[in-house]
Image: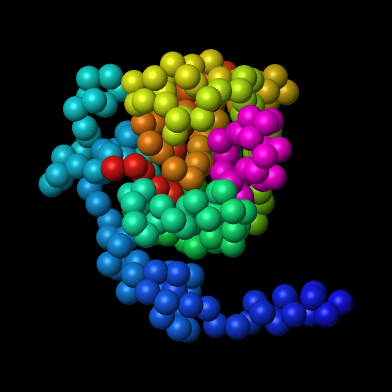
Amino acid sequence: MVITAFREWETWLPGRCAVCHAWPSNAVCEDCVRQFGQPRTRCRTCAASLPGAVPQCGACLRQPPPLAAVFSAVDYDYPWANMVRDFKFHADIAWARSFARMMRSIPWVDPALEAADWIVPMPLSKQRLLERGFNQSAVLAAALEAGPGSKVRHDVLVRIRDTAAQSSLPRRERHANVAQAFAVHPDWFTALCGKKVVLVDDVMTTGASLQAAARALTQAGAGHIVALVFARTP
């Protein structure tokens, strides 16, 4: 009873910025968001940072990915990388609310979420889910929702085989590692036909996992797929 009362009281306490330690503050103060979270020009189909007003990178022009668009709030760099690690590996799930707020501030993200029929988090393997205790992408997807009616569908996309951690592999091996790793659950085949889907993940590095998931959704009949991530590896 005492612990519960303390936790309820603690939520009313002002916080400190995790970057500059300003007090009182949100989890990341507005000054630090402006300093480290400035919008960048990004490729519209892989979210890689681009110079000037170039709309698409050379790699995506040569080989168009199976995603209509990819949105990223920040680069996976200081100070965001430390926050993502705390969120993902230390179960500090309170970060989801701050990440979602920044993700929704990206131009065109709110319209994409509003137009979506479903918001689908990237699934974890059973082993990784047992190790971690939660799916960070599912927590982010839930934090992104606004308004009545849930669009989040946790069980549409399933991971049908365990793979080596993408972070442990060289860039050139990552696409092969996740090829055929995802599938749409048979219960959702009919309902998925023609649906507009937003795929949600915490970090995008090469895009191999998101692209493999998008191919599985497309093969099952999804009509339009975009991806939304908090951080993109530079």
Q: How is the image coloured?
A: rainbow
Q: Nearer the viewer, residue 148 or 41?
A: 41
Q: At 37% from the left edge and 59% from the top edge, which residue is drawn?
A: 79
Residue stretch rendered in magenta on the structure: 119-146
Q: Is residue 123 above or below residue 114?
A: above
Q: At 28% from the left edge and 19% from the top edge, which residue is drawn?
A: 63
Q: Is residue 73 above or below residue 197?
A: below
Image quarter in which the N terminus is found: bottom right
Image location of residue 8, percent across then percent down: 73, 77
In the current view of this chain or complex, which residue is farthest to the left? 52
Relative side of 194 to 3, left or right: left
The quadrant in which residue 156 appears is top right
* Residue 188 visible, this angle: yes
- State yes or no: residue 137 in magenta: yes
The quadrant in which residue 121 appears is top right
Image location of residue 85, percent across then percent down: 49, 51
- State yes or no: residue 80 in magenta: no
Q: At 61% from the left edge and 50% from the top edge, which residue is drawn?
A: 139
* Residue 221 visible, this angle: no
In the current view of this chain or complex, which residue is farthest to the right? 1
Q: At 35% from the left edge and 67% from the top edge, which residue is drawn?
A: 33
